[in-house]
Each structure stands twice: as C-alpha cells, then as structure tokens.
Image (spheres, rainbow, N blue to C red):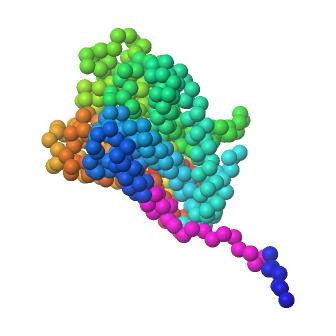
Amino acid sequence: MQHRQDPSSRREPRAWRISPPLLLAAGFLALILVGTVLLKLPFATTTALAWRNALFTATSAVTVTGLVVTDTQATFTLWGELVILLLMQAGGLGLMTFAVLALLSLGGRITSRRYLAASGTLHATHPRDVMRTAKEVIKLALIIEGIALVPLALVWVPEHGWLEGLWWSLFHTVSAFNNAGFTLSSDSLMAYAGHPVINTVIPALYLIGGLGFIVIVGILDYRIGRPLDINVKVVLLGTLVLSLAGTAMLYLLEADNPDTLAALPALSDQLWASWLQATTPRTAGFNSLDIGSLTQPTSLVLMLLMFVGAGANGTGSGIKVTTLFVLLAATWAYLRQRRQPTLCAQVIDTTTLLKALAVTVMAVIGIFMGTLALSLTEQADLLTVAFEATSALGTVGLTRGLTPELSGAGQFIIMIMMFVGRVCPLTVAYLVGSAFASSGDTVKTQLQIG
C-alpha cells in the first residue's frame, strides 16, 4: 500500500549556511584566478605577458580598480579585452548582489515593485534569494548600460568605424558603470577633456553605479507625497555635495596650472575637465587631466574623495558617503553636547555608528600600512606613494605614474590592497551588523554602511 505524503511535512529548501563575507571573498578569488589564466592564453595578448602582470590585471579588473601595469589596448587582443570586460562586469555586479544579500541575511527587506524577500534567518542565504537578487541586479545594470551605449556610440562610431566604435562604446560603458576605470586609450579620457557627451555620459554611469542597487530602486519607485528612504536621501545629498564642492575646488586649485586646466583652450573645456576629474575619484578611475601634473593641494583633495568613495551597495568602494555623513553627524552632536546624533531628522543607532567607526578606522590603518610598505619597496616621494595606496585601497585606479613602474613587491602590495579595499568595508559592516542582530538590539535607523 502506498502512503501519501502529508503536505504539511514538506520542508522548505534548506538555506546555504555560508557567511556572505566568505562567499564574497571566495567568489572574487575564484574570478581573479580564472581571469589570470584566461589572460595568459596566447591569443589573449599581442606580446608575451608575465604571470605577475596577468594576475595584477585580473585583480584590478575583478576589484574594478583600473590600475594597470600594461597598456590595455596595446597589450591585449580583442579576446583579452573581452575577458577584462567580463571580469569588470562580474566584479561590479557581484558586489552589488552581495550587498543586497547581506542586508537580506540580517533580516532586512526591500519592498518595491522590484520586490526581494528576505530569508529572515541570520547567516542563512537561500538559493532562491541569491538567484532572485542576481537577476534583478543584472537586469537593472543591463538596462542602464544599454541606454548609455547609444550616445557613446554616436561619438566613437564616426571616429573608429562601426565595429571598433561599438566595441569602444560597450567597453567604456561597462567600465564606467562598474566604476572600473579601464579604458582602451593610453591616456584614458584626456583626448576628450572638453567633450560634452563623454563628460556627461561617463560620469553619469559611474555616479549611478556608485549609488547602489537599493538607492536606484528607491529613486525609481519614488512617488510624490511619499517620503524618501533615509539611504536615498543621504547618498543623493552626499553625492551632490561632494561632486559640486570637488569640482569647484579642483577648478580653483588648477585654473592657473599650465600643465592641466590652463592648457585647455576654453572655459567650457576647463569646467568639463574639472567636473570629470572631481567626480571620478569616487572610485571610477578615469582621468581627463594628467594626474602626475596636478598640484599637491589638488592631489590631497583627490585623496580625500578617494577615501570617501561612493554609496553603499554600489559598484564603488571607499568608506562610503553614508559613513562620512554618519561620522560628521556624530561629531556635530558631540560638539553640541547632545547624547544622540541625528541625520535627516532620524536618530543614528549604536550599530550604525559602530559600523561607520570600524570601517573608517580600518581604512585609515590600511592606507597607513600600504603607504609604509610602498615606501620601503619603491623609489618615490611620499605624496606619490600615499596617493597610490589610497587609490588602491579605495579601488579607484588613479595614479601619479607609479603603477607602471612598480617593483614585483610593489605590485604584490597593491594587489593585496585592491582586494582588501573591495572586500573589507562590506565585511566589517556585515560582521558588526550581525553581532548586534544576534544580540537582539533594536535598530532605529536603516542606514547602509560599507
């Protein structure tokens, strides 16, 4: 006799008992190793490529940094460039997916027309959550990249022809949205310092990618009369303030520099160049001015912007805009002798404040250690070394000319910093958040840090 199975006895699919930070680190390492092997294939390069340089390029692409030890277009064939493109896309979207999954695994919830259900169990990531999240992130990214591809093609197809022009457009679209900074030109975007289309579309891509999935969805689902989520408010406000202030400071500091802005013929060209160069340190890594020719004050401003980075849950790195504003709010509360800091009329809870402090302190220590290590291995001045360390840890990709001249030990140090800078901020934020979630502490705000 056959017995029917009681429907109530059916169990839900078992969760994957995998820590999201471990999943992120393992995924990035696997991508880097696979990318290294693919870049070493004979038909991937036009000249012989050392294993060390292949590993460096793969690490830079997966961590979407953009620091390069070889000229991308001159060194790699179309196949090699395709591998780099896929590594950039996987690295950028992988981080966005992880950021949302980490939120879900801590019991968070994203409610919108792009609805994602939380598993509700700490450290338990269901396969259905992984697939659903990945699909939504990829879908949104492809739509944005597809829209941006058109205006870029209108610029590069007439210059390079149909096939090469479309490839240039696709490559730079993926690189910009994922905040990677890889280009097919040896001088990055310096030839387009005053081009309105390039200086509009490329920054739009890396700024949107840097906002993060949660913020983008919050903007798309906004309705008049409904209050914006605090993350959307803070990230948008921070992005606006840093972008405009950075542009103004860069213009004022470089307007008389004959090697940078003063070399451009028109005021409009100078303003466009100031705009791109002030926004790209938010982990994008493109440059329309010669970074090595910037004055010391300007370099320090760029280092600050690289340290801050983009928005949480986005394709950029750094300590994040939200982290900066949380620390500023806490400092302001201390100066005014208030017991609890507030941001956008909301009280900042202990968990959020500890996340911000942990991420910031570890970033400062990382930059110091990286600068110290590079000072021992490289023959360069302190500003150049510190700039390189900040760029690597922030996965920015800007350099004052040190990267192509790095020693073997220097390359190894930069690779470690790129990897740590990509994985560490979200890992620290997740660990602090999970510790408080396990203790049952009440969360008053839902600010995303890391």
- Where is residue 242 drawn, in percent x and y? 44, 32
Write down the region rendered in magenta. 8-28
Inspect this view and state whether residue 380 appears: yes
Residue sitting at x 61%, y 64%: 126
In the image, residue 23 above or below residue 425: below
Residue at the farthest right position: 1
Which of 203/169 is in front? 169
- Front-most of residues 424 and 88: 88
The answer to which quarter of the image holds residue 389 is top left
Question: Is 43 on the left or on the right of 94, as rendered?
Answer: left
Whether the magenta-drawn stretch holds residue 405 is answered as no
Residue visible at 46% across and 32% down?
172
Query: Position of 404 compared to 41: left or right?
Result: left
Horizontal and vertical percent position of residue 133: 61, 52
Query: Where 229 falls versus 249 (above or below)?
Result: below
Res 176 visible: no
Seen at 71% across and 36% down, the residue is: 223
Where is residue 77, by image quadrant? top left
Q: Residue furthest front?
A: 43
> Dividing the image into 4 quarters, which one contains the N terminus?
bottom right
Q: Is residue 415 left or right of residue 113?
A: left
Quarter of the image holding residue 362? bottom left
Q: Residue furthest top?
A: 266
Residue beneath the point at 62% across and 58% down:
129
Q: Position of residue 376 (x, y in %)?
A: 16, 49
* Rendered view: 164 above or below 282: above
Q: Which of these two is toward me, 208 or 157?
A: 157
Exactly how many numbered labels are in the figure?
0
